[in-house]
Image (tube, helix red, strand yellow):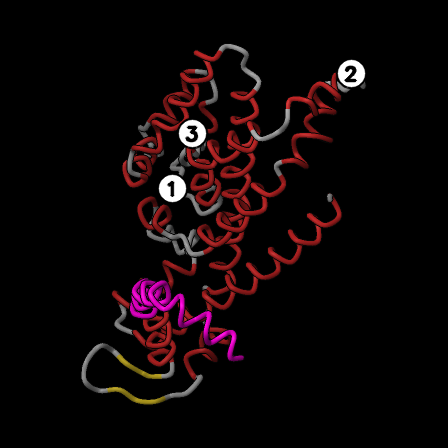
């Protein structure tokens, strides 16, 4: 104990510097969450009148909210599709770039991958909203190739609106994720490729038995970060449909936004936010546990 206190005292200036970021984390992350949980126990419409209702907001959310099931289903569909896009497409693009022999072509491809990331995401979603209009690019292209029977109001049909949101942003290039994978490919020793070649391994076997296992660490962290980001995401849905038509594309974030800023039910909206946090937290823990177990099996 005395040795520990002496070590802390010797490094007191380092701990002092750590207090600054910890103070900001407490102020902008921990305090808002605790305040949100406090508000979720109230019947509050933003004015001076508040009434403590305990867990009534949570009971209403889980037992009486007609849109909860649809919102959870939609966000899970979008999350699974988003993970395949953010991780799968990025891995494939990095694999292609890594196996290009020309150094100049590799450089050009890296620039090609990272440039779309410089464009704000809101610009891309607004463009796709125009593409999906009845007279937009998607329907025009379908008409040009003789598929007129597939033309429709993509964001106005309850049966296809979620699918349309999934495909918005095609070809789903993620520059940061691709560069992370590319850095991982560069860390694979050349001797391992040479050994695989001597053993007669095909490109497919090299990919499956060498490259994918060697990049398991990058895959785990990208899966976790993508899962957290996608489950709390709602900006693309808000820009494209605002949860419509007829609440067919509603997600928890849209449900929270409407209850807070359209209906003035801040206590109920806070209950949605706290529940969403708990849901993401539990799924993140499960994801980390499964990733750890799979990593131990691979090793």
- Of the two numbered discs 3 and 2 in the rendering, the one whose residue sits closer to the viewer: 2
For label 2, the residue is: 198
Residue topped by disc 3:
151
Q: Dot 1, crowdedness within 10 Å: few (<14), some or many (≥20)?
A: many
Residues at badges 3 and 1 in contact (C-beta under 8 Å)?
A: no
For the N terminus, the quadrant is bottom right
Does residue 134 show up magenta in the picture? no
> Residue drawn at (49%, 45%), measured in percent from left and top?
159
Locate residue 195, reporting x and y percent: 75, 21
Residue 78 vertical placement versus 64 (above, below): above
Cα distance between the residues tagged 3 and 1? 12 Å
- Tell which of 216 and 149 is nearer to you: 216
Q: Which residue is mark 1?
A: 155
Q: Front-most of 210 and 81?
A: 210
Can residue 94 be seen here? The reply is yes
- Residue in the picture at 32% in, 67% down: 16
Percent across and percent down for residue 258 are 31, 63
Which secondary structure, mark 2?
A: helix
- Under circle 3, the secondary element is loop
Label 1 element class: loop
Q: Which residues are magenta?
A: 1-29
């Amino acid at each position: 104990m005395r040795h520990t206190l002496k070590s802390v005292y010797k490094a007191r200036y380092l701990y002092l510097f750590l207090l600054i970021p910890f103070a900001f984390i407490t102020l902008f992350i921990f305090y808002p969450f605790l305040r949100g949980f406090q508000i979720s126990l109230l019947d509050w419409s933003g004015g001076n009148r508040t009434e403590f209702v305990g867990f009534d907001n949570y009971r209403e959310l889980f037992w009486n909210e007609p849109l909860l099931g649809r919102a959870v289903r939609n966000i899970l569909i979008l999350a699974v599709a988003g993970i395949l896009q953010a991780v799968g497409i990025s891995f494939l693009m990095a694999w292609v770039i890594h196996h290009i022999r020309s150094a100049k072509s590799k450089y050009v491809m890296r620039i090609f991958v990272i440039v779309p990331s410089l464009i704000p995401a809101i610009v891309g979603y607004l463009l796709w909203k125009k593409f999906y209009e009845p007279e937009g690019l998607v329907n025009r292209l379908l008409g040009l190739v003789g598929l007129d029977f597939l033309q429709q109001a993509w964001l106005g049909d309850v049966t296809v609106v979620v699918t349309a949101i999934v495909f918005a942003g095609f070809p789903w290039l993620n520059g940061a994720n691709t560069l992370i994978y590319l850095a991982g490919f560069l860390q694979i020793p050349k001797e391992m490729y040479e050994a695989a070649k001597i053993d007669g391994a095909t490109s497919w076997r090299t990919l499956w038995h060498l490259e994918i296992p060697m990049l398991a660490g990058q895959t785990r962290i990208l899966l976790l970060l993508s899962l957290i980001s996608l489950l709390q995401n709602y900006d693309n849905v808000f820009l494209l449909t605002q949860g419509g038509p007829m609440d067919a594309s509603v997600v928890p974030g849209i449900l929270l936004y409407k209850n807070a800023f359209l209906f003035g039910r801040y206590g109920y909206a806070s209950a949605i936010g706290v529940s969403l946090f708990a849901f993401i937290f539990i799924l993140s823990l499960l994801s980390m546990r499964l990733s750890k177990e799979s990593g131990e099996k691979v090793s």
